[in-house]
Amino acid sequence: MKTALVCGAGGFIGGHLVRRLKREGFWVRGVDLKFNEYSESEADDFVLGDLREQAFCRAMIDQSFDEVYQLAADMGGAGYIFTGEHDADVMHNSATINLNVVDACHKRRIKRVFYSSSACMYPAYNQEDPDNPLCAEASAYPAAPDSEYGWEKLFSERVYLAYRRNYGVQAFVARYHNIFGPEGTWTGGKEKAPAAICRKIAMARNGDAIEIWGDGKQTRSFLYVDECLEGSTRLLRSNFAGPVNIGSEEMVTIDGLVDLVADIAGKRISKNHISGPTGVRGRNSDNRVIAAKLNWAPSQSLRLGLEKTYAWIETQVCRNFPAEKLVA
Ligand code: NAD
């Protein structure tokens, strides 16, 4: 039986990944500081612990797993990573995890290790025009990410690829672009734009206004979690180390995203633009490399993913907020 380790298994993408690997027939160990919030993990072995601790990390990588997925990170949405208040934690915590994991993989002769970097590592100067952002893999340098979260991702990408060059660790690096879906953080300050907008609209009455950070003209693309897993497993099982974008090319303005969710919800919603952390002006995935190297690229429409996500968040809102706040 093939074996896999998922670091960050108690998180959003990690939880979905464990489920997928179980469906594929793997024996799976999951590791995280916490359990999944919204469903029971399907991991055969789920260990609570801190991957910043080297001894714990080594103990988790105690066998030559066929596949290791390193997703653990100190992260959140714009309200967490762009305010500057968490910079030291974000850099220290995530860099320590990555240094520990890649070194333990090397020492245990792990066959294949996947690292989830982020589009946040791309230079801010290429993302000032909302209509024409440049996020081709080769445009990463000269480096100028707009957040410490992005700098840590870039540093850790280099660590994995250095272990590949110097020690022959089969490391694979993906740059995720805004992954969303059911069972993602939807409230509490670490949620990202699609989840926050779904929540606000689920809680709004027909005709209400919801608050949007920035002027709403900033652009992004959003990838549904199932496609993220498809790209990640394909990459790890390929001969291509990356770094490679795993994202959607369906770019939308934040106002456009609000209109789409409102349409799915069947509500008339107006927008109240307020100041808030927004990140770069424009960002979109560039899928030319993934299409060429893996002969595959994400293709599902944003609307389809949002329909599933909105339905899940609406259920969460109904469970967690008093009924009188909800829509007629
Ligand atoms: P998440 O926050 O839901 O999951 C990360 C998990 O890591 C959490 O469960 C957290 O408890 C765990 N963790 C943090 N510190 C730890 C530690 N010291 N020891 C053990 N576990 C620890 O995030 P996610 O959305 O599932 O993202 C997974 C990965 O993908 C992250 O590395 C993230 O940076 C990257 N990524 C995600 C997105 C996205 O849109 N979701 C975009 C780009 C990159």
Image (spheres, rainbow, N blue to C red):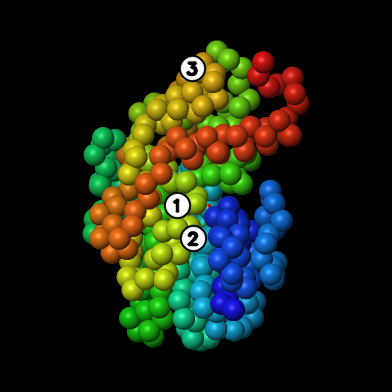
Q: Is residue 26 above or below residue 276?
A: below
Q: Residue furthest top?
A: 207
Task: Identify the residue shown where x is 59% and y is 63%.
Answer: 23
Asked if residue 7 shows in the view, the reply is no
Q: Say which mark, if any, is on residue 91.
A: 2
In the picture, residue 46 is in which quadrant? bottom right
Rendering coords of residue 298 (x, y %): 37, 50
Nearest to N terminus: mark 2 or mark 1: 2
Q: Which residue is mark 1?
A: 227
Disc 3 marks a residue whose amino acid type is Ser
Residue 304, above or below 69: above
* Left/right of residue 133 with respect to residue 153 in the rendered view: left
Q: Could you tell me how many numbered marks the image carries?
A: 3
The residue pinned by badge 3 equals 270
Ligand 1 is within 8 Å of the C-beta of the residue at disc 1: no
Q: CA distance from mark 3 to mark 1?
A: 31 Å
Between tags 3 and 1, which lies in front? Answer: 1
| Residue 98 visible in rendering | yes
Q: Residues within 10 Å of mark 3 (few under 14, many from 20)?
A: some
